[in-house]
Image (cartoon, grey):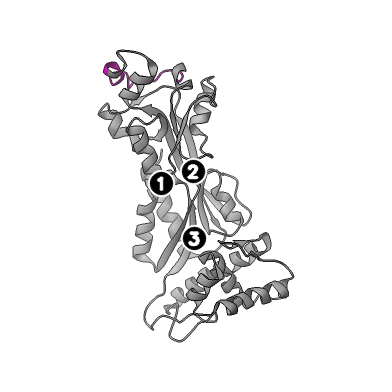
Amino acid sequence: MQIPLDLARTLAAVIDEGTFDAAARRLRLTPSAVSQRVKTLEQQLGRVLVVRSKPARVTEAGAAVVRLARQLALLEHDALAEFGLDTERGGADDSGEPRAAAGAYRPVPIPLAVNADSLATWYLPALARVAAEHPVVFDLHRDDQDFTAGLLESGTVMGAVTSQATPVAGCLVRPLGVMRYEAVATPGFVARWSGRAEAERGAGRAASRHAAALPAWLAHAPLVDFDRRDHLQHDALHAAGLDPERAPRHYVPASNDFANAVKLGLGWGMLPEFQSDDELGRDELVRLGGEPVDVPLYWQQWNLSSPLLDAVAEALAAEARRTLA
């Protein structure tokens, strides 16, 4: 049994775009033609490949087909680039999409997964260098570092920054470094919630001295969580012997906004060093105590011999060496 490449690419377009109508616009086909292609592929393979919801969701069987389509597209690009040929030349390709003019590369889409703090700090400069040297566009999927590996398993992305050291099946893994987090808050927040009259005046002078554990008053002080899967603040309280469930929570689901919420005194939170060092140096933030939390990060990518994907990996590794602990 063979999987027709044009049908596999059509399925990948549906998943990438989220709907059959959007995929049809991208492929320059009618929505009914896209639907018929996917239905034909499902009949040939005897499997349901896509859940027809909004957005469309790939099934486990469909994920294998989408992964195949993306792998073939990447390998095709690498082969043509090695020959010195354009990736697309005039006319239409086998998915019905018009080819770019001769002499010009059509950028290759590379879907990647990354955690929010990396995306907001060190990650994008590496991708910018790759995009300046290669015909590529990036489709970034943001998720917690504990969950990005799942996007590799499903075939949604080709590479991911993850906390998982064990390679996903069919993937390569390499260490990137450690992202170190510390519990911090503003001096005003400490004064308000600790009940110490001298806290605001003295907190800045105490900023360089790490307490052995978080202070007990944090059990009832507001904290800032990224989202309901963010466990850094929860784990820090638990490690200090405090009840993590008692503390009121703000949810701020964007890395820079999360850091700003802490810096504005909305609550305390665990911030990476490079989001708090300047403010700590100016006594605008203070350390609350407890040991720093080190989150090791790894790069995982499909186990393909692809110069383009390897270029992404090398750029990310180089940037991580400059930035992470």
Calculate the distance from the C-alpha at mark 1 to the C-alpha at mark 3.
19 Å
Q: Residue at x 45, y 77 (%)?
A: 87
Measure the C-alpha gap from mark 2 to mark 3.
Answer: 19 Å
Instruction: Say whether marks 1 and 2 touch (CB < 8 Å).
Output: yes
Q: Main secondary structure of the magenta part?
A: loop
- Position of 278 with respect to 72 (left or right) is left
- Name the residue at 35% across, 13% down: 196
**203 within the magenta span:** yes
Specify few, some or many for label 1: CA neighbours under 10 Å numbering under 14, 14-19, or 20 or more. many
Q: Amino acid at mark 3?
A: Pro
Please state, as top left, top right, bottom left or bottom right, where the C terminus lies in the image: top left
Is residue 157 depicted above or below 295 in this figure? Answer: below
Q: Which residues are magenta?
A: 201-214
> Which residue is at the front of the view, 244 or 157?
244
**Quadrant assignment, res 314:** bottom left
Q: Earlier in the sequence, mark 1 or mark 3?
A: 3
- Residue 125, position in %: x, y? 35, 53
User: Which element type, helix, strand or loop, lies under badge 1?
Assistant: helix
Residue 215 visible, this orientation? no
| Disc ID at residue 320 | 1
Residue 132 appears anywhere in the view: yes
Tag of residue 111: 3
Q: Nearer the viewer, residue 271 or 25?
A: 25
Sooner in the amino-acid sequence: mark 2 or mark 3 = 3
Classify mark 2: helix, strand or loop.
Answer: strand
Q: Position of residue 90 (x, y in %)?
A: 43, 85
Q: Residue at x 32, y 18 (%)?
A: 206
Residue 297: give its label: 2
